[in-house]
Image (cartoon, rainbow, N blue to C red):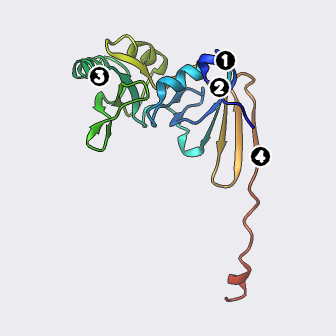
Amino acid sequence: GIKVSSLNEVKWLDLTIDGADEYDDELNLIKGGGGALLQEKIVATASDRMIVIADSTKKVSTLGAFPLPVEVLGFGMPTTQLLLEEMLNGLDVMGNKATPRMSGDEMFVTDEGNHILDLHLGRIGNARQLALILNQVPGVVENGLFIDICDVIVTGHGDGTVETHDINSGETDTAQFLPEPVENVFRDAGV
């Protein structure tokens, strides 16, 4: 079987394979839709390489259509929310609304005991700048922008093709993994 270890035991990884909520041409990502962005970023940055597997609906020309998760402390969260919204007014984004993530009627709680504010930005003009600025806001633990972390994207398309793009080599390969559609012999026979 496969031996399972924690990052506390091994300290460094050869490879991380994960998904993404959105990605752009430079393989910058939005992650954290499931709420584990802090742990996912720690694991990804403690790896020699990161491969993301996603379907073609996750590819965007500009990040920001998917709400950007920001992990925040519970203490002072309304103040952190206000500071984030005010800070966003001066940046190259379309929206500035920060909403607490809920789990039913309760605030969503991360594995680390924090909360998530989802930023509804519409479009992020400068993801690198935003990633740096977000983490300067008091109360912010981490944000879901993964900038210059992903090395390879494997994208599945509805027609059965899979495209692999390696940002380091600049190479893109395409392969057909699902067979071409087969004729329906029952329909053709009038059944």
Query: Residue at coordinates 54% horizontally, 26% vertically from top-left?
Result: 40
Nearest-to-viewer mark from 4 and 1: 1
Q: Nearer the viewer, residue 67 or 123?
A: 67
**How far across and down, in percent of the image, does residue 35 sit?**
43, 33
Answer yes or no: do the residues labelled 2 and 1 have beta carbons within 8 Å?
A: yes
Q: Nearer the viewer, residue 172 or 144?
A: 144
Q: Earlier in the sequence, mark 4 or mark 1?
A: 1
Q: Which residue is mark 1?
A: 10
Residue 74, which numbered label? Answer: 3
75 to 185, vertically: above or below: above
- Residue 186 as seen in the image, left or right of residue 8: right
- Residue 58 as seen in the image, left or right of residue 17: left
Question: Which amino acid lies under the numbered mark 1 shown in the image of this protein?
Answer: Val
Question: Which amino acid lies under the numbered mark 2 shown in the image of this protein?
Answer: Ser
Nearest-to-viewer mark from 2 and 3: 2
Answer yes or no: do the residues labelled 4 and 1 have beta carbons within 8 Å?
A: no
Q: Earlier in the sequence, mark 4 or mark 3?
A: 3
Q: Which residue is mark 4?
A: 175
Indicate the quadrant where residue 76 lies: top left
Q: Which residue is mark 2?
A: 5
